[in-house]
Amino acid sequence: MKLEEYLEALRNCPDEIVKFRDNPTSERNLQLLTTELGVYDNYPIFLNTDFNKVVEHLKKSNYRFVKKNTHDNYKFFYKPGTVELQVLNFFPSGLATYNFDEEMKKHNERQNKDFNMGIVLHPYQEKKIKDVSQERAIALVIDDIGRYAQKKGIALCFPNSIGWNYPKDYSKIVYYKP
């Protein structure tokens, strides 16, 4: 899927709870953002750019620097609330889509080759945005980072952009190459 299409879908997806079946005997309530667009905890974003420039951008933007865990791992909070960002100066290979058939292996190889850093989004922050779901808060950060990549000409991948309703539709993986 093209980056702009995905970002538009994120912005236009209603905050709505839907029934989701993991299997024939299990049903649960999830956000439409999850079932259609894959927005959920541990949402990875892969980039191919200078790590230090991303860290500096986040420090000057709508993010609050929390701490430096190691030279390869920084933590930020999205200032309005709810989202924690782990910014990693390495490719987080274990965070891509969970289906490991032959086609997904090809995507994993491509991602490992084409991207050198990652950002992982978590809805863990105690301060919440009033009347905003955790998934919508994550979607706001995804949109922000997607626009940053477009503006700066940074290659990007959202490997989990496959909605949970479409587990093997790999055409929904967002790749952006300026």
Image (spheres, rainbow, N blue to C red):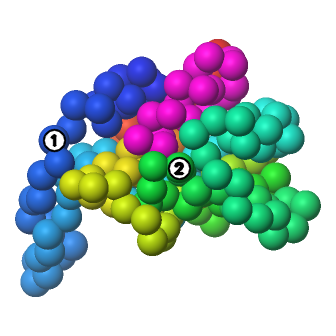
- Residue occupying image coordinates x 10% and y 59%: 18
**What percent of the width, then of the height, locates residue 13?**
21, 38
User: Is residue 171 visible in the rendered structure shown here?
Assistant: no
Amino acid type, callout 2: Lys
Look at mark 1 in the image and give the residue it sits on: 14
Look at mark 2 in the image and give the residue it sits on: 79
Magenta residues (range): 140-157
Amino acid type, callout 1: Pro
As for residue 155 lying within the magenta part, the answer is yes
24 is higher (above) or lower (below) than 140: below
33 is higher (above) or lower (below) than 42: above
Q: Quadrant of the N terminus?
A: top left
Please count the marks in the image.
2
Q: Residue furthest bottom?
A: 25
User: Is residue 82 visible in the rendered structure shown here?
Assistant: yes
Q: Is residue 65 left or right of residue 51?
A: left
Of labels 1 and 2, earlier in sequence is 1
In this rendering, the label closer to the viewer, 1 or 2 = 2
Q: Helix or strand or loop: what does disc 2 sit on?
A: loop
**What percent of the width, then of the height, locates residue 150?**
59, 20
Q: Quadrant of the C terminus?
A: top right
As for residue 113 lying within the magenta part, the answer is no
Q: Is residue 29 left or right of residue 123?
A: left
Residue situated in front as seen by the camera: 161 or 43: 43
**What percent of the width, then of the height, locates residue 106?**
60, 47
**What percent of the width, then of the height, locates residue 171?**
39, 35
Q: Is residue 142 left or right of residue 154?
A: left
**Classed neighbour count for the residue bearing mark 2: other residues with Cα under 10 Å, few (<14), some (14–19), many (≥20):** some
- Circles 1 and 2: CB atoms closer than 8 Å: no
